[in-house]
Image: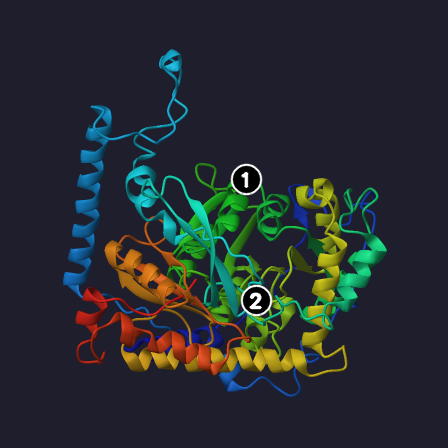
Amino acid sequence: MTAYHQFRKTEDMARTTAPVPNGKLNIQLNGNNFKNANCKKNGYHNKAQKNSTAHSAGPPSSRQRFQRPESFENPPMYVAVMTYLGFGIVTLFGYFRDFLRAVGLEKCHIAREREEQKDFVPLYQDFENFYTRNLYMRVRDNWNRPICSLPGPVFDVMERVSPDYNWTFSLTGKTIDDVINMGSYNYLGFAENDGDFLKTVADRTQQYGLGVCSTRQEMGNLAIHEELEQLVASFLGVESSMIFGMGFATNSMNIPALVGKGCLILSDELNHTSLILGARLSGATIWVFKHNNMQSLERLLREAVCSGQPRTHRPWRKVLIMVEGIYSMEGSVVRLPDIVALKKKYKAYLYLDEAHSIGAVGPTGRGVTELFGLDPSDIDVMMGTFTKSFGAAGGYIAGKKELVDHLRSHSHSAVYASAMSPPVTEQILRAMKCIMGLDGTTVGQARVHQLAENTRYFRSRLQEMGFIIYGNDDSPVVPILLYMPGKVVAFSRAMLKRKIGVVVVGFPATPITEARARFCLSAAHTKAMLDQVSTTRKHTQGHKHTHTHRDIHLSLSISPSLN
């Protein structure tokens, strides 16, 4: 059975299942009622919207309802064997070099305790540091490259050299100009320095200054913060929203305020570190289900409902499903309709992280809920960041009014963190109004459509060339598989020589046999830029790449780029 037919079968089963109405995220989180009399209303709340018709005219199309099959092609066996062999060789050389350092034949650059501290508990575990000093350090020049210009569709990279195999770097004073930026999450191109576009940001800086120097519960609650919360709620079609100054902390500091001991979190195995950290800090029990696998998720939901908590078998206080809209390392899109159906069937709650999907997918850029034509009220907790599509910083939590009121008084990020910087707030307002057309132009929607066009074009180009790429056709994140550790390093260096800025990723950030380069598309990329990136393979590969010889070329030669 093909992936397409398997998906259709799963979708049909979900639709024939009678959905059980889900309660509100109700609101006894950590034993505290959202409608606490001591909880002071702060910010803007929309009236409840029954559905998302404010965003789209007419019923959702079948294209919105159906997610295209995603590509996760497995490598040939010999590629996996050669990859393991490559890691084995560099590991053996690592132990040999450790021996040379121990006998004094090679200079040791690693951090070590002083001789008089040898009897203390070691600060630097030798084995834990093995990978860093013997594998990563040899290829460290491929990461943390300093740039010295606007990180738009092109940027300037500061040239650097290392006299000691990447233990230290020194700048040469030269720059590599006009490098095509295929790595930044600048999906809609709002990371820009156009004076006309940024005039309102400059005006807000003059009015409020750069920093607030206080939390919002004290002296840092500005009028533009409440204006932004109102706009976010309107943009998403929900009752209320709350903004935070840091995207990572939006997850890690708010999840502990929603669940705690006696609660169960069902987490996708590929969830972002911020979600994982927040889940661990909450003290809740964490069960992991296979990525986008509805059978795995339903099995855990059924077990949670039937068996309850371990030992006592008491019912879980709360069951929270945590997923992402677009998974940034795989380029896959969440199977949201299926998850919503399971959530309703088993009366669980749903936490959706739209860090990479908000602004980047959907006919009008409103994320995966719009992509699938779903009602935003079906998502109990909607989270997103402003660091990508909006060219700014920070994040938001959106949903029902009771949810947001609870977070205002219980979230560590809300109570203790400094309020969002005024110019950053204005940048988000500017970008969001542009997307919504509230600035009187169609520039925002043109960027959304251009990103979708660039995504389809670039993915189709790579597929025509025969490369193994991961992810969904709608995802602007395009991972291309490189597999072997030596190939990963050579790929990144070769692309920079050809003025294409890429970021490569390998173990332990990915499975050991799935090292990759990850392209991030932007509305600011031109077709000529994308053609230059895709055809650079002609310089890094000595001959034409065809589907017939795909596996051989993928394992023995260098391929296209990303960041």
Q: Return the residue at label 1.
A: 281
Number of disc labels? 2
Which tag, 1 or 2, sits closer to the chain's start? 2
Closest to the observer, 316 or 499: 499
Residue 426 image point, x, y percent: 75, 62
The label number, if any, that marks residue 15 in the structure image: none
Closest to the observer, 316 or 292: 292
Q: From the image, which quarter does the C terminus lie in?
A: bottom left
Residue 219 image point, x, y percent: 84, 44
Element class at badge 1 = helix
Q: Amino acid at mark 2?
A: Val
Residue 203 image point, x, y percent: 81, 62
Residue 500 shows up from this direction: yes
Residue 116 image point, x, y percent: 39, 11
In the rendered structure, the answer to whether residue 535 lies left or right of residue 513 reads right
Q: From the image, which quarter does the N terminus lie in?
A: bottom left
* Residue under the image location 23 percent in, 68 percent down: 554
Residue 505 falls in which quadrant of the image? bottom left
Q: Return the residue at label 2.
A: 20
* Residue under the image location 32 percent in, 79 percent down: 463
Quick check: 400 above or below 99?
below
Quick check: 205 above or below 129?
below
Tag 1: Cα neighbours inside 10 Å, few (<14), some, or many (≥20)? some
Separation (CA) of disc 1 from disc 2: 31 Å
Residue 315 shows up from this direction: no
* Residue under the image location 31 percent in, 40 percent down: 131
In the rendered structure, the answer to whether residue 163 lies left or right of residue 373 reads left
Q: Amino acid at mark 1?
A: Leu
Element class at badge 2 = loop
Closest to the observer, 543 or 311: 543
Q: How is the image coloured?
A: rainbow
